[in-house]
Image (cartoon, rainbow, N blue to C red):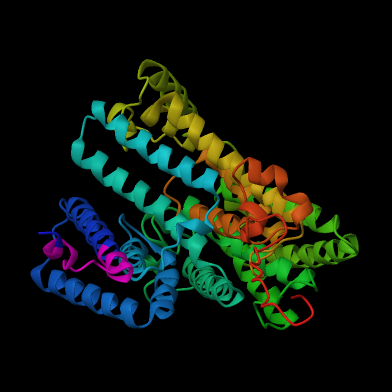
Amino acid sequence: MTELVARQPVPRPGALLRLSRASVGAVVLGLVAVGLVNALDTTSLPLALALAGGLALTGFLLLAVRHYDTAIAIALLLMGVVRFEPAPPDIAFAVIMCVAAVTGRFRLGRVPVLLRWMVAVLLVVNLASMIDVVSVSVALRFLFITVYLAVFALWLTAFVNSSSRARLVVVTWLVIAVASAVLASLALHVPIPGRQFINGSADNGERASGLFKDPNVFGPFLIPIALILLEQHIAPKAPRLLRLRAASIWLCLLALTLGVLFSYSRAAWADFVIALVVMLTASSMRRAGARRALRALTALLLVGGLTVVILSASGSIHFLEERAHLQSYDTQRFAAQTYGWNLGWTHPVGVGPGQFLHYSHIASHSTFVRVFAEQGFLGLLLWVALLVATLVLALRNVVLGRDTHGIGSAALLGAWCGLIFNSTVVDTLHWRHLWVVAALIWAGAARRAPQRSEGVWVALGLARPNGGRSRHPFGARTIVQPRAPTARTR
């Protein structure tokens, strides 16, 4: 009997690892399938379109397996197409993350421990809030998108671990942002083919929205990449992710600025101003930074002058002035926010994901109000903690002079401050670019820090010990083997 037991084959560690990856991948694929079925349950698609979508999804899966980075580039380009949920980039990134889980490319160890726990507990609170939902299908759909975006941020943090991958994110974002801004601006004022489709039906197509459903989302989507582009130009010591001439950079900035302005979103305008002020202030505090920030400010004033000329030539000044004032529906927005606060106090665990509109006929227009109403006080506390922790990490990156593999820390700090402001007046929980900016800040924080400055951050769980190096205080242990005795030592 002992011999029989001894002869049993012992699984190799590699086989166990492959089996665990396959199991995780199968679970993730199952969850994605359930989420997609639930999300598309209310959508009626022709059979031919459904078959074409299935073939495209299968082809994309094969592409992600064979050419991982190419599939990611396509998914990043699709971030400019968000007319419905789940949006095309959601489906693409869901497939990519499944492939990453199966092939061992999803490395959560690169994400700061505290942030991992915050995201995990926030998702558990979202799940617990479903005990009092009115519509289970809406709750499952909303929860699926929230879980996907949180996991997506963790995956992107682990993915951006080199300058080549940071360049992939920046280049694709710049391409789709500039293209969307140019097309949306032209569609407002020039009778180009497909102009009604480009800007959609929001506000009768009078506001630039690109291929987004809401102009209030389109404008802020353009801001982070504009800041990254600007810091690449004014920070000479930063790694060059973009090899563009000065004229090309300013033309891109002009296009992005016009896109933000023509979105006619007051929140986007305030977001842009706050982000620019924070970024230029942070940049001016560096060595010789004041001179560079002044040059950038002068150039931005020139861009602003050109923008005013274009607005005047297109006859948009009057509409711009009208949008800058209080609107008739602002009173309804404030009433909805007041109702949301009351709803949160009367439901300790919240009314459930995506349920706010079942209690109010007007959206909350505030992420804080929505989270409080739908996940209760604990959900709001965790959301605020996640925003503040990310803000602290962004400040830390600026103080330490640490970029995210070439993506400037001052630009990310400015973008995050602008997004926090936006969250007070718009529901940003499902904004893809909010989670992308958070992931880029987290990826920067995961880089090595000077050992003398990182003790408090390690204690808070916001950095890995020794910047991810060996835990031994003097580096890796070296085992010294005893020498063989020689004639002199005998």
Is residue 379 placed above or below 3 in the rendered structure? Answer: above
Q: Please tell me which residue lies in front, 12 or 128.
A: 12
Q: Where in the figure is residue 449, as x and y percent of width and height?
A: 71, 58
Q: Using the rendered view, name the quadrant where residue 84 is placed.
A: bottom left
Quadrant including the N terminus: bottom left
- Going by the picture, which residue comes out furthest to the top? 346
Q: Please tell me which residue lies in front, 459 or 367.
A: 459
Q: Using the rendered view, name the quadrant where residue 252 is placed.
A: bottom right
Q: Which residue is drawn at 35% across and 26% down?
A: 350
Q: Residue at x 45, y 22 (%)?
A: 341
Residue 48 horizontal side relative to residue 237, left or right: left
* Main SS category, magenta section: helix
Q: Where in the figure is residue 269, as x and y percent of width and height?
A: 62, 50
Q: Where in the figure is residue 86, as x and y percent of width and height?
A: 30, 56
> Number of callouts in the render?
0
Quadrant including the C terminus: bottom right
Residue 35 horizontal side relative to residue 395, left or right: left
Q: Which residue is drawn at 20% across and 34% down?
A: 135
Q: Where in the figure is residue 279, as x and y percent of width and height?
A: 74, 55
Residue 56 horizontal side relative to residue 337, left or right: left
Q: Is residue 314 visible?
A: no
Is residue 313 placed above or below 140 in the rendered structure? Answer: below
- Specify start and end residues of the magenta stretch as a single range: 3-19
Q: Is residue 18 magenta?
A: yes
Q: Is residue 168 magenta?
A: no
Residue 82 horizontal side relative to residue 327, left or right: left
Q: Which residue is drawn at 60% across and 42% down?
A: 389
